[in-house]
Amino acid sequence: MAGKKQEMYDEQLLQLQEIDFVLLELNLYLDTHPGDIQAIQQYNQLAMKRKQMQMEFEAAYGPLLHYGQSYTKYPFQWIESPWPWQV
Amino acid sequence: MWLYEKKLQYPVKVSKCDPMMAKYLMEQYGGADGELSAALRYLNQRYSIPNEVIGLLTDIGTEEFSHLEMIATMIYKLTKDATPEQLKAAGLGEHYVMHDHALYYQNSAGDAFTATYLQAKGDPIADLYEDIAAEEKARATYQWLIDMTDDVDLQDGLKFLREREIVHSQRFREAVEILKVERDKQKFF
Amino acid sequence: MHKYSSYKTYTPYISKYDPCPPMKVKSYSTPINLYLGFQPMNLPQYQAREALQKGTLWPALYSPYEKVKMRKPLFSKPQTQPELQPEEEEMD
């Protein structure tokens, strides 16, 4: 990847990392605050938005998850580089 | 079971070729208070802890694996194109002889990872205090690592990881609060 | 409301027989988790981008580290106090 495509990828990946981080933080918070209804609403809303973002990201850059949790084009996309530590 | 997600939790950037820093970072890869220790410690303790905190141990333990991947990425990038001479100069000559450019679960002094880094007493308060201490020790290690580099991009990733230790410690402290309330009285409220 | 500072300082004993030039002031981190107690509900949150960048969703949990050489002694003269402001968080 280079130039514009790399920039687009970086930005979309960053957006995914951002929403996933908020969800993770809310998750740990809810682990010790299971009765916070507002946090639960925020969690569910973001989880829905996250599903949408995942579909868009995967359509452009390939699957994020394995074991049938993401769709794949032909040939099998899961094995394609770059892996996260290579980017 | 676990799923792998093909992305890092936080973007890791390294701007300087610095194999010596890679050696230091191994403390958080295979060291006593490192990310592997943390992940294994919490995921192992969850089988013998009251139900209220199993979710927390599962979730923090899982997050630690994503931190392990971040540290691995830093070490990988810092050593990827280093020559044997550069590795030798960085104190990684022995590492090269044994492992070439492979990563290995060892600490910054080259000692192999051992299960003796992990504690599991089966006593929930003892175990949670152990976890809080582990988070504080990891936080301190990240401070000393930040002190050891002037690579702003590397510092950025290390600062993220340090802050995560603070949040984890906060949650473990809350878990202690949850477990110390009068459990048998709770049901009458 | 009480104020907290994210590090504290102390002055080690200095002997004239110490071989290295003395570090007159030493400091240690005192992160927010020492003070917060059980996190209250509905605390203000960062936007997603800032949350990821800071490493936490809540400003109340953000407790950054400064490199040693950048830190100032907390007990020195009042004129150094304004520099310490960013280090201090207000909390309930």
Image (spheres, helix red, strand yellow):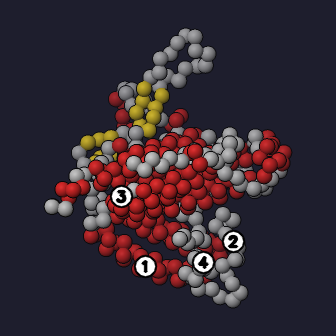
Q: Which amino acid, mark 2?
A: Pro
Marks 3, 4: nearer the viewer: 3
Crowd around label 4: few <14 · some 14–19 · many ≥20 (10 Å): some
Q: Nearer the viewer, mark 3 or mark 2?
A: 3
Looking at the picture, which amino acid does disc 4 mark?
His
Q: CA distance from mark 3 to mark 4?
A: 32 Å
Cα distance in 3D space between marks 3 and 2: 41 Å
What chain does mark 1 sit on?
A
Chain letter of the residue carrying label 2: A
The crowd level at tag 1 (other Cα within 10 Å; few <14, some 14-19, many 20+) is few
Per the image, label 3 sits on a secondary structure element best described as: loop
Q: Are marks 1 and 2 in contact (CB under 8 Å)?
A: no
- Residue at the farthest left position: B188
Q: Mark 1 highlights which residue?
A: A49
Same-chain status of marks 1 and 3: no
**Which residue is label 4 attached to?**
A66
Q: Find the residue positioned furthest to the bottom.
A: A74
**C14 lies above or below C83:** above
Q: Which residue is mark 3?
A: B50
x and y percent of residue C85 in the render? 36, 41
Q: Position of residue B123 (x, y in %)?
A: 39, 48
Q: Residue at x 43, y 50 (%)?
A: B122
Q: Residue at x 53, y 34 (%)?
A: C69
Sequence order check: which comes first, mark 1 or mark 2? 1
Q: Closer to the observer: label 1 or label 3?
A: 3
Q: Earlier in the sequence, mark 4 or mark 2?
A: 4
Q: Nearer the viewer, residue B7 or B182?
A: B182
Task: Work out whether mark 4 precedes mark 1 in sequence or the reverse, and give the earlier one.
Answer: 1
Q: Residues within 10 Å of mark 2 (few under 14, many from 20)?
A: few
Mark nearest the camera among 4 and 2 is 4
Residue type at mark 1: give it.
Lys
Q: Is residue B168 visible?
A: yes
